[in-house]
Image (cartoon, rainbow, N blue to C red):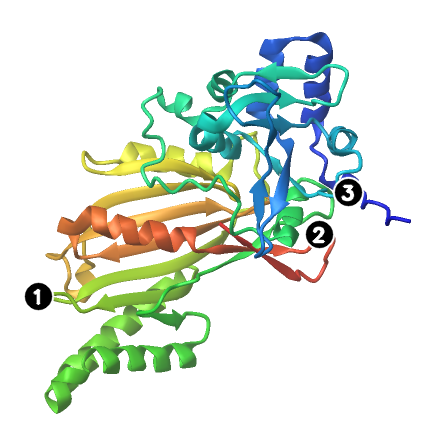
Amino acid sequence: MTDALPDIPASSRPGPGAAALQAALAAGDRAAVLGTLRGAAVVVPHLEREDGTPQVRVFDAPDGSARPYELCLFSSAAALSAFLQDDPGREFSLRGRDSLAPFLRRHGAVLERVVVDPAGGHAMVLSVAEALGALDLDADAGGTGDGDPTGLADDSGAGISIDGLHAMATVDEPGGSRGIGIELNLPDHWAVVDLDDPHERGLQIRAIVKQQTAVLGDRGAPLRRDLREQLTAVAERAATAGGRVMAYLTLPGKEAALALNLTLYWHDLGPEVGGVSHLQRIDDRLRPTLGPDDALTTTETLSGPFLRHVRAAHGSPELGGQDVPLLLVDYWAPAPGAQSVARLAFSTPHVEARDAMLGLTDRVLFATEWLMSEPGAADGAAVPVAR
């Protein structure tokens, strides 16, 4: 006797988009199916890698096909269950166009077709080009292909655990998960300052200054004192403005040290109103202020979008830095559940190395993890969800 296959959880079904997609399929309305795929999440089966992370699952294409695989999309968990029948692989995730379009761009060469609800009575077969034309995010940017300047859009879900995927799938449900914080996973050579505890903050600043001026010996005492005062003033200002963490990267270079500073802010903004997202309101506020060399761009990832704001500035007059040119890079990321926004604010004096600095800051952003409340948890127990 074999064990019964696990049920696919109904709590992870898409919402109103499922009914719209099923109605479009029943009517044989190709344009409506494509439009619904563009605006709604669909159920996508996936395989679980050895490390427990998901990978989109594809299926063998029909005999005689020019390409080996096909991608199957489903309007609901029930439609997927009907297709899988006794297949033991029951894992799936909910994905929208921000995930599906990059996947099709990357893997379209080995996909014969895209099939929607293949086990239903109204299955629809789409070409890869047809599906991509409906889903492609670059179409919103005039088809230029430069809507994501980072080149790091996450379409694989490789860093998201099964628990994290379930948490992400419940953000629109009563009692569902929501983002309650963000975790910085900084590589070596970053020194972190906790802004919440003044005593601990002072100890951490003292340790950073001591480490960075160790080669000066006793003659560096006046410089150490000045640096401690400056870092303390910066930290106090950041804490007053809602900063949670500051971090400093200082690496030896051929002629001078490489300096990059980071401050993490967390903004609790409450529910979105008027049908306008928090990220769109931030975009609307920042865009009129852009200078000729500034850039404001949006990138989509499986765990949500983020806004990257790059601009030139000068140091603070209060700290005597008014003549020091700076490159400022802000990342605004709305937490899942549309209640809060995280801001990662970077600054560096290496204006001439703009591309290299953006490469560093992009990778710090993509190493972060959302801390999600567990579905239904009143005490805010957290589930980490990697970007």
Q: Is residue 72 above or below residue 344?
A: above
Q: Which residue is mark 3?
A: 9
Crowdedness near tag 2: few (<14), some (14–19) or many (≥20) residues, C-alpha within 10 Å: many
How far across and down, in percent of the image, does residue 242 sit?
A: 43, 60
How far across and down, in percent of the image, does residue 177 sit?
A: 66, 50
Q: Is residue 81 above or below residue 178?
A: above
Query: Picture quarter containing residue 143?
Result: top left
At horizontal 69% and vertical 26% (from top left) the residue drawn is: 75
Number of numbered tags placed on the structure image = 3
**Pointer 3 with pointer 2, Cβ within 8 A:** no
Residue at the farthest left position: 255
Crowdedness near tag 3: few (<14), some (14–19) or many (≥20) residues, C-alpha within 10 Å: few
Asked whether residue 194 appears in the rendered view, the answer is yes
Q: CA distance from mark 3 to mark 1?
A: 58 Å
Q: Which residue is mark 1?
A: 255
Report the amino acid beneath label 1: Glu
Q: Which is more foreground, mark 1 or mark 2?
A: 1
At horizontal 12% and vertical 84% (from top left) the residue drawn is: 216
How far across and down, in percent of the image, does residue 19 sit?
A: 73, 22
Instruction: Return the residue nearer the eye: 59 or 245.
Output: 59
Q: Which residue is mark 2?
A: 375
**Pointer 1 with pointer 2, Cβ within 8 A:** no
| In-image side of 83 versus 235 (left or right) | right
At horizontal 21% and vertical 46% (from top left) the residue drawn is: 355
At horizontal 56% and vertical 29% (from top left) the residue drawn is: 275
